[in-house]
Amino acid sequence: MTNFANEADAVTYIFQSMRKLRGQTRPPDDVGRDPTPTRRLIEVLDLLAIRREYVVVTGSKGKGSTTAMTAKLLQYLGHRVGMITSPHLISWRERIRVNGRAIPEADFVRIVGELAPSIDRIEATLSETQYFSPTGIFLAIALRWFDEQRVTVGVLEVGRGGRFDDIALVPNKLSLFTPITLEHAYWLGPTLERIAWHKAGIITPYSRAYSVPQAPQVMQVLSTEADLRDAQFDWIAPMDMAKYIGPAENGLRMRLSRYGEIILPLRGRYQLINATLASIAAGDVHARLGGIPHASAEYIERIRAGLAAVQWPARLQKMQDSPAIYLDGAINGESARSVVESLRESWTQPFISIVAVPDDKEYAEVYAALGPVSTALILTETDRNPILSFPSAEEATASARAHNADVTHIPRLEDALELAKSRAGTSGTILIVGTHSIMADVTLLFGCSYEVI
């Protein structure tokens, strides 16, 4: 067993193998990602020896929210639920949870130390172009932790793809597909069909898959993959989706089939589709695990209570009241437009938008969505993730001014927020959108903790 001093020490070790590729151009996922080292680790340590239900979630947007909702519903139905999500906000341990609680630092450090000798032996056999995926190591930590915590069902979020993701090594009986759009073109491919092919790789033989409505070509790819795997593929008709009723003080009011009217403590209207998918998924898994009868009043109340208890940070999260400050991880035009639609009934004037979108994301489209509805745009950055780069001040300002004449570029978030507060006053609204790293910066500024959600 290897001893690590703390979380940071353990995380440094987890990324050690990947660092040997620093400076090299990594190829697309279908060439460069190889889950074989993780498979070997799982087999050597027998990390899938305990049979439990697994749900695997993929998509281009909404997969984190759907994972959190599905896990919360299963918890409220009486099951002990393990969850894997990424990325994290403050602590790497947030990626691994049991019944909403992040793995404690002591256990995280201990388990990494227990896995390290086996990881090192496998690492010693890898070529110069192979590496041990950090995602795979996090998966192994989670599986060991789930065993120790006697988890009965795991709900696991895939990273950007699916077919070559380490999470796909887990033998799920249910795969979920949130909206699939053009994203990560270099890694996944330039077409919707190719991206859908990557995502479809999570479907396992003789399993079941559910999808929200997708573009026709995406549906065809998912259906074909299910046929090849002898899996059952179903999609949710628009008429069966949760219906938006109106805003609520801490979220939104919706109507969801037999569950009636529910206050969902998440503000984005895009959460309606995620809530619908999660409620169906929880019912599918619960039917196999047993417990509260599906047709009972108690089952309906547990689903209602679970949805009312969901937390998923940095998704139109309200940070304070005066001025109202909202936080969202929108990094493309479609997500930014959805944020505008979701907040339109709630914002007050002046409406100030702080934007921090990297140069490899749709920063111009985000400016286009927020510029026309904002009193002013304030562009900022973060140095939390050294891999990220942002458009130059000149380029960003010129692009934003095509949609709003009142644009300011301020590199430091703290300074950007101070300016926004002075412009908004006590009665206005501030919206902060951008990359996950800026979300982490904001939550730290506000002293937030996400040890339990």
Image: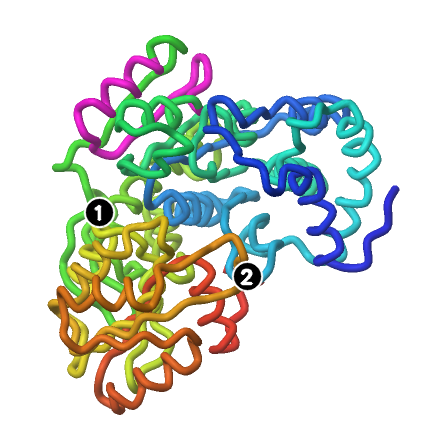
Closest to the camera, between mark 1 and mark 2, is 2
Work out which quarter of the rendered image holds the N terminus and state it: top right
- Drawn side of residue 346 relative to residue 452, left or right: left
Image vertical order of residue 283 relative to residue 441, above or below? above
| Magenta segment includes 211 | yes
Instruction: Check disc 1 and report the residue beneath it.
Output: 256
Marking on residue 452: 2
Q: Are marks 1 and 2 in contact (CB under 8 Å)?
A: no
First in sequence, mark 1 or 2: give its number. 1
Q: In x, y percent, where is residue 2?
A: 86, 45
Image vertical order of residue 275 relative to residue 232, above or below? below
When asked about the image quadrant of residue 51, the answer is top right
Three-letter code, disc 1: Leu
What residue is shown at x 20% (from left), y 55% (from top)?
Answer: 338
When asked about the image quadrant of residue 438, the answer is bottom left
Mark yes or no: residue 50 visible: no
What residue is shown at x 43% (from left), y 37% (from top)?
Answer: 160
User: Which residues make up the magenta segment?
Assistant: 202-226
Kindly state the secondary structure of the residue where label 2 is placed: loop
Image vertical order of residue 294 relative to residue 360, above or below? above
Q: In x, y percent, where is residue 132?
A: 67, 33
Q: In x, y percent, where is residue 87?
A: 50, 50
Kindly state the secondary structure of the residue where label 1 is placed: strand
Which one is nearer the viewer's eye here, 337 or 413? 413
Three-letter code, disc 2: Val
- Circle 1 residues within 10 Å: few <14, some 14–19, many ≥20: some
Which one is nearer the viewer's eye here, 118 or 43? 118
Which one is nearer the viewer's eye here, 188 or 278? 188
